[in-house]
């Protein structure tokens, strides 16, 4: 049975980075070179901003207490930036109305993930809103660029190659990057321990899930 936690995990690094990689391969195979480069730049910039916000808190305790903001939500940002773009590309040959509807569906789905992050207390409202706005900016930047550049061509190998790229990135275990943020923050800040995330209440994990997060992260760090 699929739980709400499984829905939240759609925005996880282990899912969205492979999807982003598959999109990049899709664009390259479609000979949309400029669009592929633009996608990579948009993704790199967004991921960098999210990572910097986490490093700032983990290493130096930078936060905005008045609005309960400690760091951007990677889940919310990735879902908002990637899901609408994926649907946009899949429906590139569909009528304009259907394509817009697909993008809106992707956006609504990412917002639903953001709402669950707040409900399960992984992030505060301010953190999810800021991350969602950043994701919308990334998604809009790509789609606007796609409207003025040649559309990627699709061939019989496009989807299989994109799936292979997805699998390869999955095998590289991109989720491990999240845990390295703690090490980077400690190295540059000179601290022995990171600032710990604080929330209005404890995150409500299913049985056994909290133990898994603490074991892998060594500090409760919402992604």
Image (cartoon, rainbow, N blue to C red):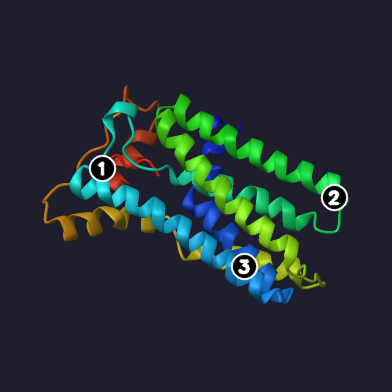
Q: Mark 3 points at which residue?
A: 24
The residue lying at 47 percent from left, 52 percent from top is: 13
Q: How far apart are marks 3 and 1 (CA)?
A: 32 Å
The alpha-carbon separation of the residues under discs 2 and 1 comes to 46 Å
As rendered, which of 41 and 169 lies closer to the eye? 41
Q: What residue is pinned by disc 2?
A: 96
Provide residue 173's location: percent of width, then percent of height.
45, 61
Would residue 146 be visible to someone looking at this image? yes
- Whether pointer 2 and pointer 3 mark residues with C-beta atoms closer than 8 Å, the reply is no
How many C-alpha atoms fall within 10 Å of the one at disc 3: few (<14), some, or many (≥20)?
many
Picture coordinates of residue 137 (x, y %)? 56, 49
Q: In this view, does 188 lie to the left or right of 11?
A: left
Tag nearer the camera, 2 or 1: 2
Give the label on residue 117, or none. Answer: none
Q: How crowded is mark 2: few (under 14 residues within 10 Å), some or many (20 or more)?
A: few
Which residue carries the number 1 mark? 219
* Mark 2 or mark 3, earlier in chain: 3
Q: Distance between the residues labelled 2 and 3?
A: 22 Å
* Residue located at (80% from left, 69% from top): 154
The residue mark sitting in front, 3 or 1, is: 3
**Of callouts 2 and 1, which one flags the residue occurring earlier in the amino acid sequence?**
2
Q: Nearer the viewer, residue 187 or 71?
A: 71
For label 2, the SS is helix
CA neighbours of label 1 inside 10 A, class few (<14), some (14 to 19), many (20+): some
Q: Is residue 126 left or right of residue 100?
A: left
């Amino acid at each position: 049975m699929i739980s709400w936690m499984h829905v939240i995990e759609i925005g996880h690094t282990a899912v969205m980075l492979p999807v982003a990689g598959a999109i990049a391969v899709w664009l390259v195979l479609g000979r949309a070179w400029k669009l592929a480069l633009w996608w990579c730049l948009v993704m790199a910039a967004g991921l960098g901003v999210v990572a910097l916000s986490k490093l700032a808190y983990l290493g130096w305790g930078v936060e905005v207490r008045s609005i309960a903001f400690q760091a951007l939500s990677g889940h919310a940002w990735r879902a908002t930036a990637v899901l609408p773009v994926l649907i946009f590309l899949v429906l590139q040959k569909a009528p304009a109305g259907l394509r817009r509807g697909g993008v809106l569906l992707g956006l609504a789905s990412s917002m639903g993930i953001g709402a669950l992050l707040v409900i399960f207390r992984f992030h505060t409202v301010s953190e999810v809103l800021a991350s969602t706005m950043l994701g919308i900016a990334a998604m809009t930047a790509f789609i606007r660029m796609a409207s003025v550049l040649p559309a990627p061509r699709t061939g019989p190998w496009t989807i299989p190659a994109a799936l292979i790229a997805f699998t390869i990135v999955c095998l590289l275990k991109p989720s491990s990057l999240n845990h390295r943020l703690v090490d980077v923050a400690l190295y540059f800040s000179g601290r022995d321990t990171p600032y710990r995330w604080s929330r209005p209440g404890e995150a409500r994990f299913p049985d056994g899930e909290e133990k898994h997060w603490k074991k892998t992260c060594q500090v409760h760090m919402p992604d």
